Amino acid sequence: MASNPITIGVLCLQGAFIEHIHLLQTMNIDTFEIRQKKDLQIPMDGLIIPGGESTAMFRLLNHLDMKDTLTKMIQEGLPVFGTCAGLLLLARDIDNYQESFLKVMNIKAKKNAYGRQLSSFRTKGTFASKENIEFVFIRAPYIVTASDDVDILATHENKIVAARQHHMLVTAFHPELSGQTTIHDYFIDMIKSSNSTQKPS
């Protein structure tokens, strides 16, 4: 019997969303764009919040009356993957900013943490025991602290740059720009695990 297809919604209000969509298409994953509140009603197995400008993205979520619905969906267990600005949107606290955003993941992040001199760069590292993974940083944040129930998946120069808490995955870098599918594959596996545990007995 064939397995049920996975559908991932991508938040397309601002930022690097099209790159996620293109990568998912190369992986033969069904995907659709989330641009307004009614799009959140489309059945989805997972959600990607892309990189971009976190303040602008959050402002649009409020303007389009999407914030509370999106927050509730994540709190109720929808698997979510936030990259760069997406990490900031999910973080419970932001170290150097006057407010936090969705406040659903038990991490404290630092906005634009690498500063202007290293605003954009590429390096390679280890993600969840998989080596030689390309990390693409663009004015990236990093995670300052994480609670005990958060798994650290990657570091760069002793800074936390990828983590998972239950059904929530974040990276400070842009895996959709690397040409590799390793981290998106990891998210797909998270979704499959979540789907299997939610099946009725």
Image (cartoon, rainbow, N blue to C red):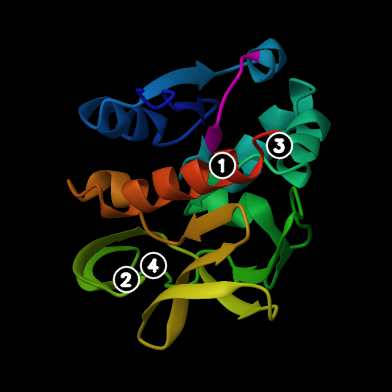
Query: Would residue 200 be found to the left or right of residue 162 on screen?
Result: right
Q: Distance between the residues labelled 1 and 4?
A: 44 Å
- Label 1 residue SS: helix
The residue labelled by disc 4 is: 116
Q: How far apart are marks 4 and 2 (CA)?
A: 5 Å
Q: Answer yes or no: do the residues labelled 4 and 2 have beta carbons within 8 Å? A: yes
Q: Earlier in the sequence, mark 4 or mark 3?
A: 4
Q: Earlier in the sequence, mark 2 or mark 3?
A: 2
**As rendered, which of 8 and 107 lies closer to the eye?**
8
Question: Quick check: 113 above or below 55?
Answer: below
**As rendered, which of 97 and 191 lies closer to the eye?**
191
Q: How far apart are marks 4 and 3 (CA)?
A: 53 Å
Tell me the chief SS of the magenta region: loop
Q: Which residue lies furthest to the bottom in this view?
A: 158
The residue labelled by disc 2 is: 118
- Label 4 residue SS: loop
Magenta region:
42-47
Is residue 29 something one can see in this rendering? yes
Q: Please provide percent x and percent y for residue 64.
A: 74, 20
For badge 2, the amino acid type reads Leu
Q: Distance between the residues labelled 3 and 1?
A: 11 Å
- Report which quarter residue 98 is drawn in: bottom right
What residue do we see at 25% from left, 32% from top? 27
For badge 1, the amino acid type reads Ser
Q: Answer yes or no: do the residues labelled 3 and 1 have beta carbons within 8 Å? A: no
The residue labelled by disc 1 is: 196
Q: Earlier in the sequence, mark 1 or mark 4?
A: 4
The residue labelled by disc 3 is: 201
